[in-house]
Image (cartoon, grey):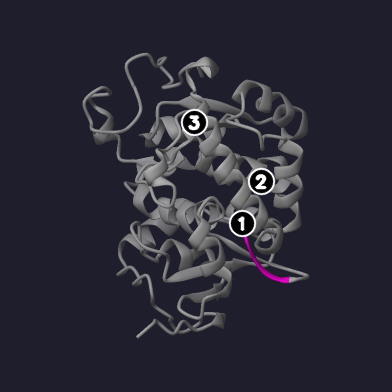
Amino acid sequence: MAIIPAALANAPTAHGLRGDYSAMAPDWTVTQDMGAYTREDHALWRTLFERQAKLVKAYAPPVFVRSVAAMDCADGIPDLEALSSRLRAATGWEIAPVPGLIPDDVFFAHLAHRRFPSSFWIRKPEEIDYLVEPDVFHDVFGHVPLLFDPVFADYLQHYGLGGPKAIEHDAVGILARLYWYMVEFGLIQTEDGVKAYGAGMLSSFGETQFSVDSPEPNRIGFNLERVMRTRYKIDTFQQTYFVLPSFEKLFRDSIDTDFGPLYEQLKALEPYAPDAAVAGDEVIHRGAPAA
């Protein structure tokens, strides 16, 4: 679930987003109506699940592969409350159905209370390879598996707890870069080489392989300040991916950093371009854009 500027949410039923915002609770949650899904909806889920499940065996870290199997949701769109029961037992997280994209402060509050906001609707067949807003497949298949990992689960809660400070410093856009590169499009070093763990690529048939195998993008070792100073692409595959040595490194650097002064420092600096390689980078692979 991505975040959007709160200004876009002033008129819940008229802001042009996909979901139905008319029946949501004050915390922007809705009730998932399992009976509303059609046979075609479940069939599309199975198609998406089957092809991504094959890919993640080769391209995702073992913890992600294990979690996908344990979620046991290959046969159709899962009941999010039933899935939440398993998640609560593992790490204390749960899934909160929402109409779609939600305001920053609401998003941060859910994460801070170990609730992951998930869209409940599924894309159309013609959107199988690309859609503008995150749907239930992106949110559940892409994000939920790592919430079974205790370290990553703690990190995501810490990210939510830090949201109010970003709002206070008018730096939500800077903090969003950390979410984009580390939650949606992160890579991690494993014993078997670099693997993809970000929800954005692991729910995308094309970008899963591109992020790991393609010679085109940069792959740069994780550095918190570097990540938060780097712009990103929203409508194409990424031009830079940052590689974590471990989830513990991401969590520890976030815990140890005073984000208030960092926001003020970064606001005074020109952001790096999405394809930049700069002095001090740990360049794992320098991208060679296609001619």
Left or right: residue 141 versus residue 92 is left
Q: Which residues are magenta?
A: 193-197
Q: Which residue is mark 3?
A: 41
Q: Is the residue under label 2 in contact with that under label 1 (CB below 8 Å)?
A: yes
**Residue 195: within the magenta?**
yes
**Secondary structure of the residue carrying numbered label 1:** loop
In which quadrant of the rendered view does residue 166 lie?
top left
Q: Looking at the image, is 6 positioned above or below residue 170?
A: above
The amino acid type found where label 1 is placed reads: Tyr
Looking at marks 1 and 2 on the same chain, the residue that comes earlier in the sequence is marked by: 2
Q: How far apart are labels 1 and 2 at the CA level?
A: 8 Å
Q: Locate residue 180 relative to residue 131 in the image: left or right.
A: right
Residue 271 percent location from the top left of the image? 33, 68
Magenta: main secondary structure equals strand
What percent of the width, then of the height, locates residue 246?
70, 62
Total numbered labels: 3
Q: Quadrant of residue 208?
A: bottom right
How dense is the environment of label 3, judged by Cα within 10 Å: few (below 14), some, or many (20 and up)?
Answer: some
User: According to the image, label 1 marks what residue?
Assistant: 197
Q: CA distance from mark 3 to mark 1?
A: 26 Å
Q: Residue at x 46, y 84 (%)?
A: 279
Mark 1 surroundings: few (<14), some (14-19) or many (≥20) residues within 10 A? many
Q: Residue at x 24, y 27 (%)?
A: 10
